[in-house]
Image: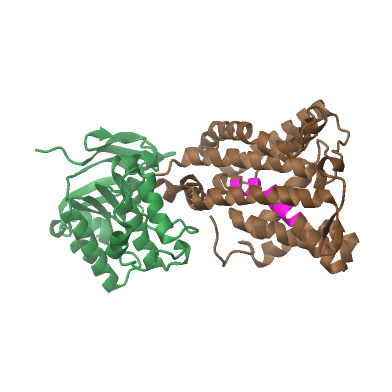
Amino acid sequence: MAEPLLLVSDLTKNFGRFCALDGVGLDLGAGEVVGLVGPNGSGKTTLINVVSGLYPPTRGTVTLAGRPVHGGAPHTVVRSGMNRTFQIAKPLGGLTVEENLRLAGASAGHRPLPEGDLLQLVGLSGLQGRVAGSLNASQQKRLDLARALATGPRVLLVDELGAGLSPAELDQAAGILRQLAEAGMALLVVEHLMGFLAKVTRAVVVLNAGRQIFRGDLDQAVQDPEVVRVFLGG
Amino acid sequence: MLLEYAIVAGLLFGVFYAYLALGLNLIFGVLRIVNLAHGDLVMLGSYLAFELYYAWHWSPLLAIVVAVVPCILVGGALYLGVAPRLARAQDPEMMSLVLFFGISQVIEAIAAFGFTSNERSVSANALGSHPVGILGQAYPVTWVVVAAASVPVLLILFAYLGRTRLGRATRAVMASPDEAAAVGINVRMVSALTFGVGVALAVGAGSLAVFMLGGVTPTEGVSITILSFAVIVVGGLGNPLGTVVGGLVLGLAFQLTLTFLPNWASLVPYVLLLAVVLTRPTGVLSRARRLA
């Protein structure tokens, strides 16, 4: 069996005495999409923050194509070929859309995708000259995604891309993620909107209180007693 | 005539105020705290200019250039030394304020030890001896030379921030360190460089402050920090372009008040500070294009 592109083992993150992640493990192969779900405070965004290098792990490892990347600064993780989007997109506000993308392409040391193609992919064509801070929330989310893609990642961690998008925009976003996976990119998609997630993948990992309580098909997840208890309190 | 004179004088002072405060705003942009030692760095620059002129017989303005490399190295090293420790502190903002207050006190003590507490000044003749005519009125040559020396510094800095890859990375870090890291920027190194540039700007501005603020003493750091803080609050914290606007607003307000209500002039920075905090807390440029 081929080595997974992203391998997370026994990942633990403590903030003082609070354990936000407790021994989480998962793997992703090229072109694979896994949804990461769980109630608020279950550790989904913390997992992305630790895997992407924003927080150092308390314990555990993260390897990207066989190379350990845990504990490295975020920019080294980006340059290794993994990037993330943010739950609340905060584009580099004073820079234009074009400058955001150029900076991403140049700083990451990869040959950037043509900016026009990226902007077309995320539906921001014609907005190159706009100051990023003047975009609306939906456009800022799409710029956040385009900027992450401009760094040429092989693994993309997507943090609640669907939040705040209209139904039509959700369909468009799901289409973009499917397109990226078809091109060979591995995607870990944190999402609260199950309908949106179902359009992208059937494979899910469920977290609760920092622990992984389920991994498998989305249909099986909604029948799993512990998952049902966590989400519905039954 | 008086109004025209006050406006031109305000613009000359305003350009200088922008230079004076720019280093404080750059350091705020990367560290998110007010560098309480800013005024003391300016004070050191004034002493550097004094020494260059009287000990070496060089132009005091050379301090602007001489300070650049050592300040970037020392400032960058200071950032790399203290930033990780501050980040691990339980209350990083409070610790930063305490740290820079301590640095301020140390610089002041060293300056008092090295230069005594007597006021030093550099002869205005160091910059020229004849008044300069602008729009039919004569202005002290020091004001004009100081403004003329400030403009290229501001232009070089804005060309760096706007036209170079490193400058754009600096703006990105000032806007959002997390997102900057997500585009592959080495936030720690860019922040260290920016901190060093901020120190160099402060020390360089000191060579002009000795002419514009009337001499130098070891204890003048606090008042310069407050003046600079007023400029960056008026223009917008973390917004370098706003610093220029803030400097011009403060320069004009100061000179207009000095001309028409001279007894109130010393209150101008404080009144402006309060007015902006109460009415436009994100600075006068908050709705316009920002450079960071």
| Residue visible at 36% across and 60% down in the picture | A143
Q: Is residue B159 left or right of residue B118?
A: left
A52 in the magenta segment: no
Most distant residue in the right direction: B263
Q: Quadrant of residue B104?
A: top right
User: Can residue A40 be seen in the rendering of this structure?
Assistant: no
Q: Main secondary structure of the magenta part?
A: helix
Drawing shade for chain A: green
Most distant residue in the left direction: A1
Q: Quadrant of residue B205?
A: top right
Drawing shade for chain B: brown
| Residue visible at 52% across and 53% down in the picture | B162
Residue B281: x percent and y percent? 63, 62
Residue B160: x percent and y percent? 54, 48
Residue B262: x percent and y percent? 89, 61
Residue A197: x percent and y percent? 22, 61
User: Can residue B55 be seen in the rendering of this structure?
Assistant: yes
Residue stretch rendered in magenta on the structure: B13-26
| Residue visible at 29% across and 34% down in the picture | A60
Q: Quadrant of the N terminus of chain B?
A: bottom right
Q: Is residue A148 left or right of residue A223?
A: right
Q: What is the tally of numbered marks visible in this picture?
A: 0
- Residue A56 lies, with reference to residue B238, above or below; the image says above
Q: Is residue A116 left or right of residue A131?
A: left
What scheme was used to colour the molecule? by chain
The foreground one among A72 and B157 is B157
B24 in the magenta segment: yes
